[in-house]
Image (cartoon, rainbow, N blue to C red):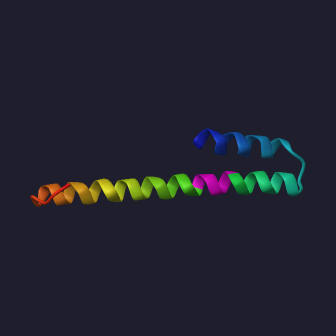
Amino acid sequence: MQKFARDARATARRLPLGRERDALMKKAKQTENVLDISAMLTVRHVDAANERRDQGGAK
């Protein structure tokens, strides 16, 4: 997904201003947002699992 976002952004930068460029930039930004949210959720999940483990709870 990171490659898609990078490629979309790079392609958009080469396009003239307009709808196609805006659409590619929007897709790149949406993909980056998904990656950010996914990373945050993963960290929270790992942190919660570690906390349960440290407290002697189930995984």
Asked if the magenta segment contains residue 31, the reply would be yes
What is the quadrant of residue 29 in the picture? bottom right
| Residue at 79% from the left image edge and 56% from the top image edge | 23
Query: Which residues fall within the magenta stretch?
Result: 28-32
Tell me the quadrant of the picture where the C terminus can be found: bottom left
Q: In the displayed structure, does residue 12 sit left or right of residue 45?
A: right
Q: Where residue 15 sits: x, y (%)?
A: 86, 45
Query: Residue shown at 26%/60% (left/top)?
Result: 48
> Picture coordinates of residue 22 (x, y %)?
81, 56
Q: Is residue 3 left or right of residue 54?
A: right
Which residue is at a point 72% across and 57% down the rendered structure image? 26
Quarter of the figure with residue 50 = bottom left
Q: Nearer the viewer, residue 27 or 15?
A: 27
Looking at the image, residue 59 sits to the left or right of residue 11; the answer is left
Q: Quadrant of the N terminus?
A: top right
Q: Is 21 inside the magenta-drawn segment?
A: no
Task: Work out which residue is located at the far front of the displayed protein and give it.
Answer: 58
Position in image of residue 58 (x %, y %): 16, 57
Where's residue 11, x and y in %? 78, 41
